[in-house]
């Protein structure tokens, strides 16, 4: 018989989501409970598929704030697996290393938590008698700037060798450098499968040996958008590996951009939004869809959308609710004024002003220099680390100035239009 296991990582149980809680408590409650419910689904999958093992490649917890309630919930899920005869192999990641409960928690006998010294555990055998061995190394501290690969023992001969490692690989633009290891280095170590964790985007980095980063199984905010999954691995009697994705997330986050170019009526804009949300919901691999909606295009509605942003947000949420299990996390208005020739009656003067600003003012050297002086004055009053966030180099500073100028024009013209409308002009 083949050997089968589920590979996951980065569950971040009970991860805090304060930003959502400030805006929509019902949505915050949904997302806050999603990590637990996703773990329950992972356990359900292991039991229904009658797998031999569950591999969790780090960051079960979300740091030092982990509560005993979180730990007890986790133990209860591990006991469900124990009753089903499923073994569990766990390595500690950087977030787990911050938690005191990680060290104090007593798991049932089916759970093996690797330490930082590089252990090897027999996990089972194929029908032909070839043994399966799992190798794992845990984080002992929250930071691991050096590679942990030297801590792993050599692969056992005549066996299937599976390695577990929490790593940023060779580095990622959105992740700190943790236990760095190149794909070629992992492949060269001689293991048949590498069960990785840490980077929240799924990737199969190599087919032979198979090197898999399963990604986070449940996104927690808009920066973890897209379908999330766990990986079910089958090792056949010849030692070949095959992988299947299983989508178990409760909620999926998506950025939904909607082009409303030429749309002049508010109700037509709402229809466009509804169509886009229906399409996004149909393609979501989760029970709920949480969207950040961005409205794009040249439209005379721009000034109303910005002036009445609170009304816009409320109406879009109502549209989302009518779609079903759909939520609006935020609304961004990135529309631009129509060209002068396309502007409706009564908008002409402001459209001409917008065109003049875009054609003559924004590209001018004097205006750019004035913006640069203003930015320099602001920068001088900020700590250095904040300055880097605003612009780490000359190109970033230029992009920031361009964005600020364009956004300023987009914000001020609707205000002028609102004043003009209020005066009855």
Image: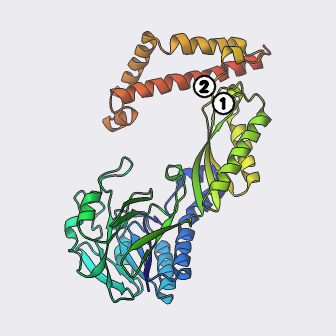
Residue sitting at 24 percent across and 56 percent down? Answer: 145
Where in the figure is residue 234, as x and y percent of width and height? 44, 76
Q: Quadrant of the C terminus?
A: top right
Look at the numbered disc 2 and give the secondary structure of its residue.
Answer: helix
Rendering quarter of residue 188 = bottom left
Vertical placement of residue 150 versus 172, above or below: below
In front of the other: 341 or 29: 341
Tell me the tag on residue 306.
1
- Discs 2, 1 touching: Cβ within 8 Å: yes
Q: Which of disc 1 and disc 2 is earlier in sequence? A: 1
Residue sitting at 52 percent across and 57 percent down? Answer: 220
Q: Residues within 10 Å of mark 2 (few under 14, many from 20)?
A: some
Q: Which residue carries the number 2 mark?
A: 411
- Left or right, 208 with respect to 22, comes to left
In front of the other: 277 or 350: 277
Look at the numbered disc 1 and give the secondary structure of its residue.
Answer: helix
Vertical placement of residue 368 versus 225, above or below: above
Where in the figure is residue 30, as x and y percent of width and height? 62, 61
Q: Residues within 10 Å of mark 1 (few under 14, many from 20)?
A: many
Vertical placement of residue 115 versus 129, above or below: above
Is any part of residue 107 visible from this angle?
Answer: yes
Vertical placement of residue 331 versus 117, above or below: above
Total residue callouts = 2
Q: Which color scheme did the rendering employ for the protein?
A: rainbow
Where in the figure is residue 290, as x and y percent of width and height? 62, 53
Rendering quarter of residue 353 = top right
In front of the other: 237 or 393: 237
Where in the figure is residue 72, as x and y percent of width and height? 48, 78
Tell me the tag on residue 186.
none
Distance from the alpha carbon under mark 2 to that under mark 1: 7 Å
Q: Quadrant of the N terminus?
A: bottom left
């Amino acid at each position: 018989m083949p050997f089968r296991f589920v590979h996951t990582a980065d569950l971040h149980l009970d991860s805090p989501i304060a930003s959502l809680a400030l805006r929509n408590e019902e949505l915050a409650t949904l997302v806050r409970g999603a990590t637990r419910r996703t773990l329950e689904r992972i356990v359900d999958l292991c039991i229904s598929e009658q797998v031999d093992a569950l591999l969790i490649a780090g960051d079960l917890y979300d740091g030092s704030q982990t509560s005993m309630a979180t730990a007890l919930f986790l133990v209860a899920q591990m006991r469900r697996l124990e009753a089903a005869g499923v073994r569990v192999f766990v390595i500690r990641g950087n977030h787990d290393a911050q938690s005191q409960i990680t060290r104090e928690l007593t798991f049932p006998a089916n759970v093996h938590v690797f330490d930082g010294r590089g252990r090897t555990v027999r996990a089972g055998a194929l029908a032909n008698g070839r043994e399966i061995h799992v190798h794992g190394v845990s984080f002992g501290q929250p930071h691991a700037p050096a590679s942990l690969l030297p801590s792993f023992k050599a692969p056992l001969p005549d066996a299937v060798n599976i390695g577990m490692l929490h790593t940023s690989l060779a580095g990622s633009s959105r992740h700190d450098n943790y236990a760095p290891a190149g794909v070629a280095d992992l492949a060269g170590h001689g293991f048949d499968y590498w069960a990785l964790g840490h980077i929240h985007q799924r990737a199969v980095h190599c087919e032979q040996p198979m090197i898999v980063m399963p990604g986070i199984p449940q996104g927690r905010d808009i920066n973890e958008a897209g379908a999330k999954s766990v990986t079910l691995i089958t090792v056949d009697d010849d030692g070949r590996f095959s992988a299947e994705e299983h989508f178990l997330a409760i909620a999926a986050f998506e950025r939904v951009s909607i082009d409303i170019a030429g749309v002049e009526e508010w109700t037509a804009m709402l229809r466009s939004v509804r169509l886009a949300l229906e399409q996004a919901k149909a393609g979501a691999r989760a029970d709920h869809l949480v969207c950040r909606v961005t409205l794009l295009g040249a439209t005379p509605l721009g000034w109303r959308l910005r002036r009445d942003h609170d009304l816009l947000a409320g109406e879009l949420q109502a549209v989302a609710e009518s779609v079903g299990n759909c939520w609006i996390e935020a609304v961004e208005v990135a529309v631009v004024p129509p060209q002068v020739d396309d502007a409706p009656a009564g908008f002409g003067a402001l459209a001409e002003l917008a065109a003049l600003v875009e054609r003559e003012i924004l590209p001018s050297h004097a205006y750019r220099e004035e913006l640069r002086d203003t930015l320099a004055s602001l920068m001088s009053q900020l700590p250095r680390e904040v300055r880097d966030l605003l612009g780490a180099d000359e190109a970033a500073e230029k992009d920031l100035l361009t964005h600020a100028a364009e956004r300023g024009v987009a914000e001020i013209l609707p205000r002028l239009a609102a004043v003009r409308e209020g005066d009855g002009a």
